[in-house]
Image (spheres, grey):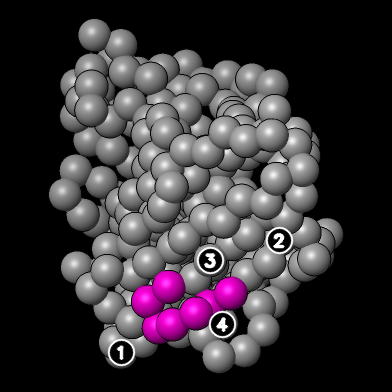
Amino acid sequence: GESVGLHLPTLSVQEGDNSIINCAYSNSASDYFIWYKQESGKGPQFIIDIRSNMDKRQGQRVTVLLNKTVKHLSLQIAATQPGDSAVYFCAEMRGGADGLTFGKGTHLIIQP
Amino acid sequence: GAVVSQHPSWVICKSGTSVKIECRSLDFQATTMFWYRQFPKQSLMLMATSNEGSKATYEQGVEKDKFLINHASLTLSTLTVTSAHPEDSSFYICSAPPWQVGNSNQPQHFGDGTRLSIL
């Protein structure tokens, strides 16, 4: 299940199950959204992105859904594996040459 | 492609010391780079935008005299934490978008961060 800790929410799933990580973004003017995976002690690693003119995009084992009406983004990971354990961040960009605004992050834990 | 390298990966130093962190784009030129800070179990916060050939742009609340940024070349940006104190201890991460090679739809790629610990 999903719980909210002091800083990072945690999502615990069984190996082989599908994971859904949610994110609420803040700026209705944002037009580009990215999901990153961060392992301990490392920088964020790109997973998948989506532009505001789309509502769904699929990659290998991952799908991103965008709902601009409620400013909500989700990342679906199919057949979760132990190597998927990490902290996942959504990020939004206003466009042009701006830096990214990151969401709070979700710690995904894979149970054997 | 689009690899970003950061150095050093880990620094421990005494309070009052100034520390320089380097961020390099290895296989592309970056006229823009970004610096982020991340405290334990928290998200990344944008500190500043590093611009080659011009002054850096700082986010609200970030002291420009405390965090000096120099975009020395098209492949190198440096962040210097001046007169560092324990509250500056954090994980500093840089990123560079490969926009300069015409890929405006490409995401930013991040370095592996620098863990700064001030005693």
Please, which chain is the residue tagged with disc 3 on?
B
Chief secondary structure of the magenta span? strand
Element class at badge 2: strand
Please, which chain is the residue tagged with disc 4 on?
B
Camera-near label (4 vs 1) is 4
**Of the residues shown, which amino acid type is indicated by label 1?**
Gly
Horizontally, residue A58 falls left or right of residue B72, namely: left
Name the residue that disc number 1 marks: B102
Please, which chain is the residue tagged with disc 2 on?
B
Asked if A4 appears above or below A47 in the picture, the reply is above
Name the residue that disc number 4 marks: B51
Mark 2 neighbour class, 10 Å CA radius: few under 14, some 14 to 19, many 20 or more: many
Residue found at the far top of this picture:
A112
Asked if A89 appears above or below B100 in the picture, the reply is above
Which label's residue is closer to the chain start, 2 or 3? Answer: 2
**Of the residues shown, which amino acid type is indicated by label 4?**
Asn
Name the residue that disc number 2 marks: B67
Which label's residue is closer to the chain start, 4 or 1? Answer: 4
Horizontally, residue A20 falls left or right of residue B85, namely: left
Separation of marks 4 and 1 at Cα, in angstroms: 17 Å
**Of the residues shown, which amino acid type is indicated by label 3?**
Thr
Which label's residue is closer to the chain start, 3 or 1? Answer: 3
Mark 1 neighbour class, 10 Å CA radius: few under 14, some 14 to 19, many 20 or more: few
Q: Which mark is residue B78?
A: 3
- Image point (52%, 56%), residue name: B21
Camera-near label (1 vs 2) is 2
